[in-house]
Amino acid sequence: MNRSSRIVRIAMITIVTAALVVSCAGLSGALGSALAVGEGLGVSGSGARLALAGVRTLSEVVDAANSPFTPEQEYYIGRSVAATILKQYPAYTTVRANRYINSLGQVLALASDRPQLYHGYTFLILDTDEINAFATPGGHIFISRGMLRLTTSEDEVAAVLAHEIAHVVHRHGLGSIRSARVIGALQQGTLDMLDEVSGAQLREVTEIFGETTSEILDTLITRGYSGASEREADASAVEILNRVGYDPHAIVRVLERMDAAQRAEYEGSREPVGFSKTHPRPQSRVNGLNTTALRNVEPESRIRTDVADRRFREALSGI
Amino acid sequence: MRRSIAFFLFVLAAVTLSAVNVGQLVTISVREAELRSNPGFLATVQTRLAYGDSVRVVEKRPGWVRVQAVETEMDGWLHESAVAPPADLRLSSTGRAGDTGASTREIALAGRGFNQQIEAEYQEQQQIDFTMVDEMEGFLQPTDELAAFLSAIGGSISDGGDQ
């Protein structure tokens, strides 16, 4: 595809996205990412954003079926985001616990709408009391010891992992990029190259790579995804849990415990850390789930919870 | 009790948007794709293809495609998320690959942009250690182990009809 036809393609997607924002502004679940753009820009749907130059965040052209990055690019971005997260948080290296998280997470990923990634989904426990979990665009998913300590059963761990998998499936991290330089590079084909690069081009592409990494880290650690992206990830997590046979209401139990932890944090008038800084109030997410994704879901689990919870306790006893 | 994952493939059918069509040339979008004898993650692996290899879609089932490799003519089933239309792998903006009659592999890998070379350069500049990321990626479990993990709690992964 040459440059002009790609620009036409991206412009077409932008037009369609803008049209959806105009016509269906009330459908927050189905159009989460499109609405995020509208909210972020304070735009009510004028023709101003139809021009390519008006693309302000990548969520306008990134969705589950369409990314301006190749799968290989997503993987390398993910690796550098993961490596930088691991500069800030040490890994919890107990093999048994990490193997358990990986088996559980990879089973859930198979049940997602995007089971196959360039490298696949892998999981790692972070050695911190902070209550948090992160996902990179390359399928590297982190969960903290603090978060695992809040869970009391396998389906609750599954709920947290399924939510993170959903962020990868929907490419929320890439969609959060708003760097004009990165967006410009994608539009101008700066990252399209057949061979190894050197000199000024190597420096330029490496800088854009660094900026892409920083933008995603900023979303994961400081800014948070949009509320619409969080709701979309919660709804997809319910679907994933349901397909495997876990109780989808487990996500509500974890959120309520997170809410209690957050209230305790506020009472101690400490600075918000971890998820509190980057996520909507858990109770608001519970309310959202109860009125949408969970409305018609049977509450009972279909897996053998006795076996699941025994291995949960064995694997995470030291957490 | 064993209905869970056997069922989710049918659910996937309802929710997966079909991005590719029978007869279409598409590209492998994962590092190593396993072409299976049936449309299921536990079906026998018949051959493996690499990222960027060109394949033609010869049959579709919900969530799955049967593809034939352009170079070797070997065929097998892949989950739809393991292939992408060639345009998604970003051909060169100059159109050079098409003009020069480069091999299908070169065309598909064009536009790789962020790659190992860029990671190495970035690592040197930023003094970032990828050792733990490499270890993390080593936690990828074989599908039969995932199937055992699931069957212990009464679930199953479909073999797509394998005996």
Image (tube, coloured by chain):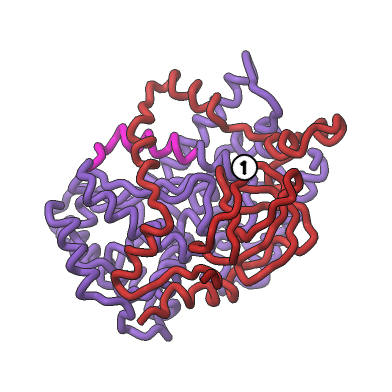
Chain colours: A purple, B red
Q: As displayed, is residue B158 above or below residue A16?
A: below
**A142 magenta-colored:** no
Compared to residue B157, the image places residue A43 above or below, namely above
What residue would you read off at disc 1? B51
Position of A91 relative to A143 (above/below):
above
Q: Is residue A82 left or right of A301 when viewed as pictured?
A: right
What residue sits 67% from the left and 71% below the top? A23
**Corner quadrant of residue A221:** top left
| Outermost residue to the top | A199
Tell me residue A90's x, y (percent): 24, 37
Query: Residue B155 falls in which quadrant of the image?
Result: bottom left
The answer to which of A204 and A77 lies nearer the viewer is A77
Percent x, y of residue A250: 29, 72
Q: Mark 1, chain letter?
A: B
Does the rendering let one see residue A96?
Answer: yes
Give the percent coordinates (x, y) of residue A299.
32, 83
Image spot of residue B27 (x, y percent): 69, 48
Q: Which residue is situated farthest in the right direction here?
A: B99
Query: Residue at left 64%, top 45%?
Result: A68
- What secondary structure characterizes most of the magenta part? helix
Residue shown at the point (34%, 57%) measured from the top left: A103
On whether residue A89 falls in the magenta region, the answer is: yes
Segment tinted magenta in the rendering: A77-92
In depth, the one of A180 and B122 nearer the eye is B122
Determine whether, in the image, residue B82 is placed left or right of residue B158: right
Q: Give, as a three-letter code, the residue at label 1.
A: Tyr
Left or right: residue B105 versus residue A36 is right
Q: Residue furthest front?
A: B163
